Amino acid sequence: MSTCRISLPYDVIVEILESTVWWPRDLYRLSLVSTSWLFYTRKLLYAKPALASFPACVHFARTVQTNPRLISTFVKGIELCPTWADRDVASRRYGAEEMHAIRIILGLNGLRTLVLGGEMSVCAERFLHCLIYSHDVEELTIDGSLIAHSLSTRPSLEWDEVIACKLASVQKLRFVRIELEVLPVLTHGSPYRFHQLTELVVDNVEVISGNLPWLLQDTTTLKHLWVSGDSSSEVDEHVRLVLESYNIESLHYQVSTFSWNLTLFEDDFASTHSLRSLHLDGVRIDSEILRMIHARCPAMEQLYISGRYVPLTREDWIGCIASGLFPALRRLGLPEGTFCPPLTFTKWTASLEPALQKACSRRGVRLLC
């Protein structure tokens, strides 16, 4: 019996591939169907390879050397997150073959997205110096999550003027679970400036030296700041420095350990007329804190409060909205209940939902679920 292969139009293949998220092994199987499938599955398989082991890095580097045209056509980003197998933890030393492979990978032309994680997040500046086409990089992530609890080594980054100049075209900068040391600019009149940076993410980062404005320098394009930490005492100072120094339009502020006092918007904080979107998660928010935020952020258009430590009842929120707090407000997100001392959280009933919706409608505010 003969088999008949049906050739699908190119646009149908694209539609199928874009309809869901495919596992690499499934994409590999689809690539064997026909040359048409091979072309489009390659684009997905090689767009942003994720290398989670040192053998994977070595094999990928060999592919780079044997198929340079394939790599230059399809690879637009790379996730270098190798970790040691349990049997290799004691040594934790790179061999010449592994280092050669890493240098080949970091020497690729056209990398727009770069993630350094796992063992690559230890003294990550070593590997950033290996970037050859660093001005192509638009998104950079240093992620120490995979080895954050290691007892023998710590994910870290030393940021200096040399690295900053190499990465001047970065649009999104993301640091996760690392120790960050920011060295001051030593060259007077240095041309170093992020001229396209719009978003900075600082996720559970310990700044052991320097501050975030030293890293950001005179950038004028930064609009979005996302900061999280164990407690407000760890992050407030750095957030305030950024808010007071740059025209931030949106701030996502999250703490994992309950904090009774949010000091970010206290009396000595200068007003920020640029801040239009604020998301607070894990902190205590009461009427007094809302009034402080209102006084210092008069242009607020979107306010989202989440977490289990907000003592305001739904009636309190109805009163705040009706009072005209945040005159420019257009979108409002609220927690699902009220924090009641000592440590209980009471969910709201549905009976007051129409009253809250009505208060928002009168102000032209969209209530977010």
Image: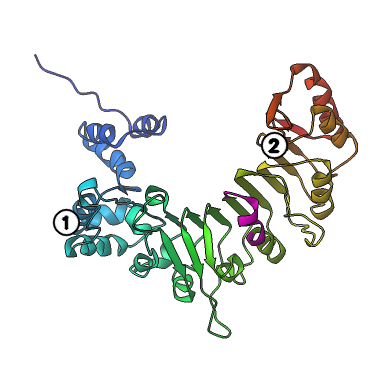
- The image quadrant where one finds the N terminus is top left
Q: Horizontal and vertical percent for residue 323? A: 91, 38
Along the line of sight, the residue nearer the viewer: 351 or 19: 351
Above or below 217: residue 58: above
Q: Badge 1 is on which residue?
A: 66
Q: Residue furthest bottom?
A: 188
Q: For the point 57% across and 56% down, which residue is it? A: 199
Q: Do the residues labelled 2 and 1 touch (CB within 8 Å)?
A: no
Q: Where is residue 342 in the image (x, y as percent from the top left)?
A: 71, 32
Residue appearing at x 17%, y 20% in the figure: 4
Tag 2: Cα neighbours inside 10 Å, few (<14), some, or many (≥20)? many
297 left or right of 347 in image: right
The quadrant holding residue 273 is bottom right
Region rendered in magenta: 229-238
* Crowd tier of the residue under label 1, counting other residues whose Cα lies within 10 Å: few below 14, some 14–19, many 20 or above: few
When the figure is inspected, residue 104 is found, relative to residue 262, above or below; the finding is: below
Residue under label 2: 309
